Amino acid sequence: MKALRWHGKKDIRCDNHLPDPTIEDGRDAIVKVSSCAICGSDLHLYDGFMPGMKHGDIMGHEFMGEVMEVGKDNKKLKVGDRVVVPFTIVCGDCDQCRKGNFSVCERSNRNKSVADKVFGHSTAGLYGYTHLTGGYAGGQAEYVRVPYADVGPVVIPDGLSDEQVLFLGDILPTGWQAAAQCEIEPSDTVVVWGAGPVGQFCVRSAVLMGARQVVCIDNVPERLSMAQAGGAIPINFDEESVIERLQELTKGKGPEKCIDAVGMEAHASRSLDSMYDRVKQAAMMETDRPHVLREMIYVCRPGGILSIPGVYGGLLDKIPFGAAMNKGLTFRMGQTHVNRWTDDLLERIQEGQIDPSFVITHTVSLEQGPEMYKIFREKQDGCIKVVLKP
């Protein structure tokens, strides 16, 4: 088969003649990929900011396709089923899975001992996302082995296109969970930092949940236009002061709910902030650029909630924790508990409440994937979301 593989920082290649995956456990399934996508989290691997990647690792954690083979113990799926595969690999049996905390499944991480040392306790296994999360082959490939396939995959009914349902595996439930964590009330102002794909779904989720006003912050005009079309008030941080504009929109009170849809590679609206984080990151004195977190803590209304779907990988510097403590802010964060939300979101797609395909700007072959990583990374050609067709 062919697949996109990591060969080092900013070196993604479409390699051919790789061995097809095979059933390794009775609960497995083999899926022939019909559509997959490049996620913003993949760029953290592309840029070399996430530890634990190895030469030849298959990329990608947003994918769907047709079930070609099932293990002997898999009673959920049958050959020919069309499925979306959540990026979190879940066993369904451990304490955390039974509580619905699927992204911290206690059994699916094959490298649990290593992750325990790094994080204190391991989290769930993830497709195509470093050996700290199990070293599983990803979905930017022609075929994928899906472990615990009697739990995770979402069977898709007839009548829905790949483009409508593909993002059920990651960015749609990620945006939805980010908004749900905010406990949105009708009087709330919800501010989303980042108008990338996850930010777009945060905006639309907050609107569906009934926020009084939703604001989205970015500096890419195409992204801001898309967020505005979804119901957000746009702020371009290159053109105006974020703090002053939010003060104006909230009559000096500050937003009640703030969402960081950016994560470790945040850009600063002030050049000194950006320079500070980039120098510290280059010198390995911090691993992530936390400008968005600092700004959220500063602007959030006392008693408010900070929701953090943006991915962080290591150590942060100069976080104003005293302000957060004294303002009584609540932090909610984590990888997405995808299967907690998929039934509801699939029903909303079927009912026409949301059509996730709006976020797609580029659809190309798998062979064009390496080029699209660069275009997506540099935000060229109006690129917001890339779908690949193996």
Image (cartoon, grey):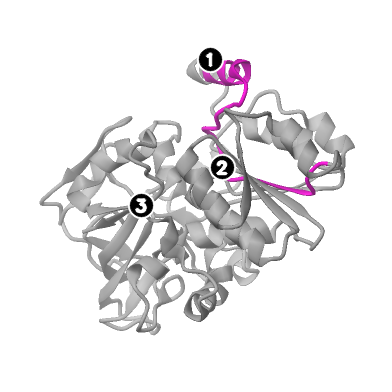
Spatial separation of the CA atoms under disc 2 and disc 3 = 17 Å
Is 267 within the magenta?
Answer: yes
The tag on residue 194 is: 2
Q: Can see residue 52?
A: no
Seen at 61% across and 51% down, the residue is: 334
Seen at 31% across and 80% down, the residue is: 81
Q: Which residue ends up furthest to the right in the rendered image?
A: 326
The mark nearer the N terminus, 1 or 2, is 2
Left or right of 168? Residue 213 is: right
Q: Is residue 345 above or below residue 274?
A: below
Q: Is residue 285 above or below residue 231?
A: above
Of 306 and 299, the residue lying toward us:
299
Seen at 47% across and 68% down, the residue is: 355
Of 35 and 313, the residue lying toward us:
35
Q: Which residues are magenta?
A: 254-279
Quarter of the image for the N terminus: give it.
bottom left
User: Callout 2, which amino acid?
Assistant: Gly
The tag on residue 279 is: 1
Residue 226 spot, x, y in % from top left: 50, 51
Spatial separation of the CA atoms under disc 1 and disc 2 = 22 Å
Instruction: Check disc 1: other Cα within 10 Å, few if <14, some if 14-19, many if 20+.
Output: few
Spatial separation of the CA atoms under disc 3 and disc 1 = 33 Å
Of 37 and 195, the residue lying toward us:
195
Residue 4 spot, x, y in % from top left: 24, 47
User: Callout 3, which amino acid?
Assistant: Thr
Report helix, strand or loop for mark 3: loop
Q: Quadrant of residue 293 in the image? A: top right
Q: Can see residue 267?
A: yes
